[in-house]
Image (tube, rainbow, N blue to C red):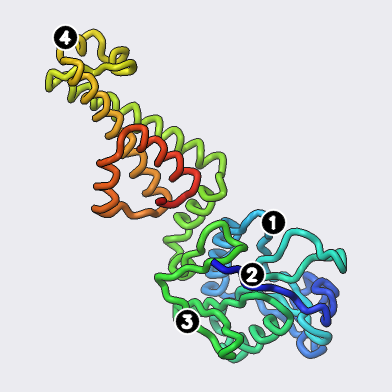
Amino acid sequence: MTQELWAPSAAFPAVDERLAVPEAGEEVIDDVHVRVMPADEPHGFAHAGLDYLLRGHVMTGYRSATDMLTRTSLTKDMAPDASIYPEAKDPVTGGRQLEELAFEIANTQSMSEVTKRARDFKARGVRRVFCINVVKGKVLEWDEKLDDWRIKSKRASIRDRCFVRPLSIAALLDTTQEDDEVARALIAKGNAVLTSALDASLEKGQRLGLEKGKKLGLEKGEKLGLEKGEKLGLEKGEKLGLEKGEKLGLEKGEKLGLERAIEATCGTLGIEIDGERKRALETKSVDELLSFLATLQHAGRWT
């Protein structure tokens, strides 16, 4: 995906040069100090979910923030509900850099007011501005060329360099999907706890697959050998097969275990295994399956 050029204007005051008093529950709009009201339950609940998703998805080198004031002009100092900004300090001011993404939540607030804020953020240089309309159950993105909002499809996602993986629009509207989306983002980040759990699942899948292969080989009179098969089923396997039976039993067990491990990993990553992909797995050898599983865990996608 071609990266969008982003160059915040230097003609404005520094983003952290305050007009509003921090922590005082106010913004400054056209030199007027405006009280920022606490949220009601629908807004507050949506806000908490948004913060959770953004923190999970944010890429290394960026930070997420809640209600963080930004100096948008000489007369305005205002805070989006949530934002993503570079972690590195501004090389000119020594303060923080301007956010690249800003999110507004509209519940009782009118869309005309949210639109004014979106124009202000874009004029300041914020790269992308989004609005979650709680009442209508929609996610919108401000289009500066159209000077209007564009509705994001619930089947779509927000792809951006600030995120470690695309952020699901559906998850922004449906709280039951938040945990799964954050888990997928943490896997994409290589989270140590989740990586350990996946490795344990893979080891268990391989062990169960080998055990089932051993049983099938014994029932059919196939030996369970080559190097691993001889160790696992030497006592009974030596008497119940030929060299071909040993090889077939072991390969079948190993393949079954690896296929299940791949299916489990795909389930965790939210990757659907359709009939074509299942047939593709069935044609692969044990070595090919091992290589594919390692690539899948590293890349986090079907390649």
- Frontmost of labels 1 and 4 is 4
Image coordinates for residue 120, horizontal then vertical, percent: 70, 85
Q: Callout 1, which amino acid?
A: Gly
Res 296 quadrant in image = top left
Q: What is the quadrant of residue 144 in the picture?
A: bottom right
Q: Amino acid at mark 3?
A: Ile
Reading the image, the residue beneath label 1 is 61
Q: Which mark is residue 239?
A: 4
- The type of residue carrying mark 4 is Lys
Q: Mark 1 or mark 3, which is nearer to you?
A: 1
Residue 94: image location, x then y, percent: 87, 64
Q: Mark 2 falls on what kind of element?
A: strand
Q: Residue at x 18, y 20 (%)?
A: 245
Q: Identify the residue position indicated by label 2 in the image.
A: 82
Q: Which numbered disc, 4 or 2, marks the residue closer to the eye?
A: 4
Asked whether 68 or 293 is in front, the reply is 293
Above or below for 31 versus 107: below
Label 3 environment density (alpha carbons within 10 Å; few <14, some 14–19, many ≥20): few
Of label 1 and label 4, which has the lower sequence position? 1
